[in-house]
Each structure stands twice: as structure tokens, then as C-alpha cells.
């Protein structure tokens, strides 16, 4: 397998009156088709690491190669194209557009890429059936349950056939039963759809769904959870 993500000596410091190092020289690689769970306590730096790996934030030092692109040297236009066509990001809170229906939210990445959504109708129907949300695609986000909202977010992430999906606490806003259902879906997406996943979580039980676990403490990779 080839490397889909390669991070080298990543460092990130935030400044808000005081200097706060958040990521302290992290190296991390992700292979095609891998499912990596990043664990750590609140404030350990795990979400910041995810933002650096996905290009949402820029590292102060070090380098991220994502899908063969060095993120420190790509243009804004290239980064936008990479987000639309190479990878997807799923947040803890679904991040759906409130005044768009579930269907419109799912199609949104295609419209932003100026693609003809009619050509993706078969793909759309397959995805909403697979994610068990066919019954609610005409509803607004506020008319959906938390689990339905997260499934819509997953459909939106998958509609572009990404090679990798980054997930920031994807079950954090769900109850235990719904969280387990979402984790079952993620495992299936990884195993049967061959999509690489990098997931931040505080749940060891949910991390056990992954093929590899990485522990973060005080902005650095450690051998095991504290």
C-alpha cells in the first residue's frame, strides 16, 4: 500500500497573550485503506493534529503530504480542489447548512465543484439507501435526529468518492446506541468501500473499531493512553 498522508515533525503553537505549544514535533503516516484512531484527553492536541493533517490549519513547522501534495506549497485553489475531490471532513456536529434540505446538503460538494448533479443521481440513491436516510432527504437539518444528521454528513462526505475521510469526534454528540451504529457504518465504509479514515475520539471503545490507534498526550505521540 502507498502512503496517503505523511506528516513530518509537525509543530503548532497558539498565541493568546501567552505562548501555548499544542503540537510538539509529531510524525505520522497513514496508508491507503487504513483506519487510524487518534486518542487523547481533552486538550491533548488531537483535534489540532487532525486540522493540520487535513489542511484546515497550517503548521508552524514541519510538513504534511496529503494525497501526494505538500500542503505548505499548494495554492488556495489547489487546496480547495483537493478538498472537493480528494478527501472529506466530518465534524462532531454535522455542520450541515440549515436552510438546505438533506438532499441539497449531500449534493453541495458537487455543486461547489460545478458538476452536473443529475449525473450523480444513481450514486446519491445508492448512498442514501446504504446509510438508511432515504426517508428524510427532503427534510431540513432541524427536522432530523442527531443520528440522521450525522448520516447525512457521511453521505455528503462520500458523494465525491474521497480516498480519505477525516473525522473529528463523529459520535461525540450522539447517544451510545446511535454512536455504535455510526461506528458500525464507519467500519463498513473502511472495509468494504476501501476509504481510509482518520478519526479523533476520546472513546477507547470506538477507537477499537480502527485498524490502528495513535495516542496523543501534551501535543506529542505517546506509547499508550494516560
Image (tube, rainbow, N blue to C red):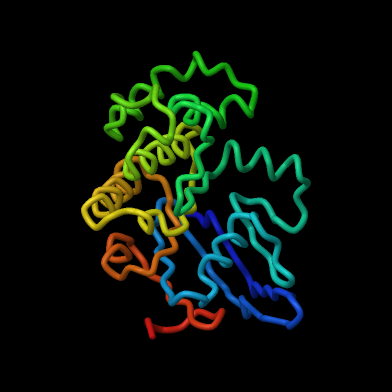
Name the residue at the left extreme.
Answer: 177
Give the left or right position of residue 218, taking residue 206 as reference: right
Quadrant for the C terminus, please: bottom left
Which residue is rendered at x = 70% and y = 76% of the image?
13
Name the residue at the top extreme.
Answer: 118
Write down the quadrant of residue 203 in the picture: bottom left
Give the left or right position of residue 107, taking residue 122 as reference: right
On screen, 3 above or below 104?
below
Q: Position of residue 112 (x, y in %)?
A: 63, 29
Q: Position of residue 129 (x, y in %)?
A: 29, 27
Query: Looking at the image, which is closer to me, 123 or 89?
Result: 89
Name the residue at the front extreme.
Answer: 142
Give the left or right position of residue 27, taking residue 128 as reference: right
Quadrant for the N terminus, please: bottom left
Q: Position of residue 116 (x, y in %)?
A: 57, 16
Q: How many marks?
A: 0
Query: Looking at the image, which is closer to me, 221 or 143?
Result: 143
Which residue is rendered at x = 53% and y = 29% of the image?
99
Q: Position of residue 39 (x, y in %)?
A: 41, 71
Give the left or right position of residue 167, taking residue 173 as reference: right
Which residue is rendered at x = 76% and y = 45% of the image?
76
Amino acid at each position: 500500500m502507498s502512503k496517503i498522508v505523511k506528516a513530518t515533525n509537525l509543530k503548532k503553537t497558539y498565541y493568546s497573550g501567552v505562548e501555548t505549544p499544542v503540537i510538539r514535533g509529531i510524525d505520522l503516516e497513514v496508508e491507503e485503506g487504513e483506519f487510524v484512531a487518534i486518542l487523547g484527553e481533552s486538550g491533548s492536541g488531537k483535534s489540532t493534529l487532525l486540522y493540520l493533517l487535513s489542511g484546515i490549519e497550517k503548521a508552524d513547522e514541519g510538513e504534511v503530504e496529503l494525497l501526494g501534495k505538500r500542503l505548505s506549497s499548494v495554492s488556495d485553489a489547489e487546496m480547495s480542489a483537493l478538498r472537493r475531490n480528494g478527501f472529506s471532513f466530518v465534524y462532531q456536529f454535522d455542520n450541515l447548512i440549515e436552510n438546505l434540505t438533506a438532499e441539497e446538503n449531500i449534493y453541495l460538494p458537487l455543486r461547489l465543484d460545478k458538476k452536473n448533479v443529475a449525473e450523480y443521481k444513481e450514486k446519491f440513491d445508492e448512498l442514501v439507501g446504504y446509510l438508511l436516510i432515504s426517508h428524510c432527504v427532503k427534510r431540513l437539518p432541524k427536522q432530523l435526529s442527531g443520528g440522521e444528521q450525522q448520516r447525512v454528513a457521511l453521505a455528503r462526505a462520500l458523494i465525491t468518492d474521497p480516498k480519505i475521510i477525516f473525522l473529528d469526534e463523529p459520535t461525540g454528540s450522539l447517544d451510545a446506541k446511535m454512536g455504535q451504529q455510526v461506528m458500525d457504518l464507519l467500519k463498513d465504509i473502511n472495509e468494504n468501500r476501501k476509504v481510509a479514515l482518520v478519526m479523533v475520539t476520546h472513546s477507547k471503545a470506538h477507537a477499537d473499531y480502527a485498524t490502528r490507534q495513535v495516542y496523543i498526550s501534551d501535543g506529542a505521540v505517546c506509547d499508550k493512553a494516560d
